[in-house]
Image (cartoon, rainbow, N blue to C red):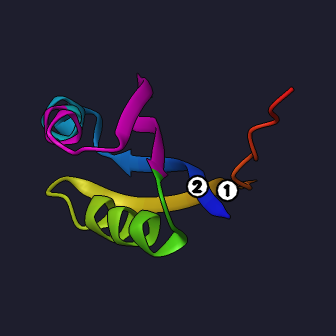
Amino acid sequence: MTEYHVCGVLLMCRPEQAPAVEQALRGLAGVELHASVGGRLVVTLEGPSYGYCADLMARLATLAGVSASSLIYHQVDNESPQEEVVA
């Protein structure tokens, strides 16, 4: 069985720091920026385990310019390898 995790995270920063934070997000694998308005940035993280996503969340929280970080959504998809049916 394999797991796949998706986390929604809200980042807060001063509005004038948002462009620098957005640029830093572009360089992180597994991170996607969805919205940035007035210093509020909505991002998703995707990865193979909660530990991987937790490490990414910790990294986001310590980016220069980020004043707060909140996990707002977490989903785990479990997939079992499907056996091939031979007819």
The structure residue drawn at horizontal position 35% and vertical position 44%, both measured from the top left corner, is 30
| CB under 8 Å between discs 1 and 2 | yes
Residue at mark 1 to residue at mark 2: CA–CA distance: 7 Å
Label 2 CA crowd tier, 10 Å (few <14, some 14–19, many 20+):
some
- For label 1, the crowd category at 10 Å Cα-Cα, with few meaning under 14, some 14 to 19 and many 20 or more, is some
Q: Is mark 1 on a helix, strand or loop?
A: strand
Segment tinted magenta in the rendering: 23-46
- Where residue 43 sits, quadrant-wise, is top left
Q: Which residue is drawn at 28% across and 55% down?
A: 66
- Give the residue pinned by disc 2: 5
The residue lying toward the viewer, choosing from 54 and 81, is: 81
Image quadrant where residue 27 sits: top left
The reply to whether residue 39 is in sight is no
Q: Whole-percent x and y of residue 46?
A: 47, 47
Q: How many labels does the image show?
A: 2
Based on the picture, tell me whether residue 79 belongs to the magenta stretch: no
Residue under the image location 29 percent in, 34 percent down: 15
Give the mark nearest the N terminus, 1 or 2: 2
- Viewed as shown, does residue 53 lie left or right of 60? right
Q: Write down the residue under mark 1.
A: 74
User: Looking at numbered disc 2 in the image, what kind of residue is underneath it?
Assistant: His
Q: Which residue occupies the foreground of this view, 51 or 12?
A: 51
Q: Position of residue 52 (x, y in %)?
A: 40, 68
Residue type, numbered disc 1:
His
Per the image, is 26 magenta? yes
Q: Is residue 54 visible?
A: yes
